[in-house]
Image (tube, rainbow, N blue to C red):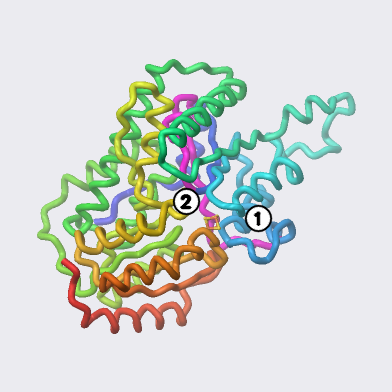
Amino acid sequence: MTPIIPRRIKTIRTHKENGGRIAAVLPIHYPRALFRAFDILPVEVWGPPHVDATLGSAHLQPYVCSIVRNALAYLLSGNLDLTDLIVVPHACDSLQGFASILIDFVKPTLHPERSHSERNEVESKTLLLAERKPILPIYLPRGTRDSDLQFLAAEFRSIYRTLTQITQRNPSDAELMVCIAREEHADDLLAELHRNRSNLPLSQSDLYRLIRSREYLPAEKFIEIVESVARLVARPARSPQLPIILSGIVPEPMTLFDALDAMNAYVVADDFACCGRRLYPRGVSHDPFTRMAERILAAPPDSTRGSAIEERAKHLESLAKTFGAKGIVFYDVKFCEPELFYHPTLRKALSDCGIPSVVIEFDLNDPLSQQTQTRLEAFMEMIASVPSPL
Ligand code: SF4
């Protein structure tokens, strides 16, 4: 079964036709419910892959990852013109640099179709400033202490005030809680998709297309599609020959899953920043801002939130034991510093628990290379004889 998932551009156009706004959101963590309360649909930008990155490269050092390079090129080529604001969570130094470039140098406008020569001479500098597309950085704490929670809740209150200025709306706490409840329901279903994947009548690539549609579909549409798929759970669970875990930032190109199918490898769980690290549990606070912050801080450990190496090792070991994975593939975007810092110690800790791993790097603009496939095949051959840690 292949679920029918609306395309990103159609989703954007429909939302705009209904009078809503669109926020282009860079990776990784942000409060979806907060934007929806202002009728702003967050649409995530993970690169995207396979764009001409030349325009982005002109502004960036060559060692900046392809997610940031592509995102800048995509924006400069006019592909984000339909969006009304750009949100840049501070996941890493590269994204921090991206936000600074937009704020201080590139300065995207809300009406890029109007060139300077078309502007009325009397249009003042103030008006030009007002035409700038708002750029909203989000600063995330690097811990989970009470002070981190308070900091993040305060950060969300500050974003609320900015969104009020942009939209002239003022959603109440009750309205925010309705949006939070809807996102929590969608995230419960997302977690169920992850957990029950081997019972679902979906290929690996279809499963990940559905999981990743959470990056742009409104929660209510995502819920509708997942519920229709969940009703079809009838098949006995798969017993994959080579159960593995994929870890990293984003699984691109998606043909990766077809290649894994051909190797009889099945991803029983993932630790991707765009997927498994965003399985946000429900919050408990009755204050909407604290509740949105609680959810993000209680997510699985993540390099971009500064989680301890031991915490990540324990999480990966627990995933491997729970789902019977025989090995872990760290499938990472080239030059991703937050991920690279962890690898040596994290892999040593996993190896000490008998869990083999391999690191494979890729660039978003490359197709799945023969070299990557050969390395994956070699790893699968190696783990074939490893007993499952169950
Ligand atoms: S791939 Fe790594 S370096 Fe690039 S934006 Fe994501 S977290 Fe930052």
Q: Which residue is mark 2?
A: 306
* Relative to 62, 173 lies left or right: left
Numbered mark located on residue 241 in the image: none
Q: Position of residue 34 (x, y in %)?
A: 46, 29
Instruction: Quarter of the image for the C terminus: give it.
Output: bottom left
Callout 1: SS: helix
Which is more toward the observer, 25 or 156?
A: 156
Identity, as a three-letter code, of the amino acid under mark 2: Gly
Q: Is mark 2 within 8 Å of ligand 1?
A: no
Q: Residue pushed farthest right? A: 121
Taking the image as four quarters, which one is ligand 1 found in?
A: bottom right
Residue 184 vs 6, above or below: the answer is above
Disc 1 crowd, CA 10 A, few/some/many (<14, 14-19, 20+): many
- At horizontal 59% and vertical 39% (from top left) the residue drawn is 137
Q: Can residue 268 be seen at all in this image of the molecule?
A: yes
Q: Which residue is mark 1?
A: 73
Magenta segment: does it hold 303?
A: no
Which is more toward the observer, 81 or 174?
A: 174
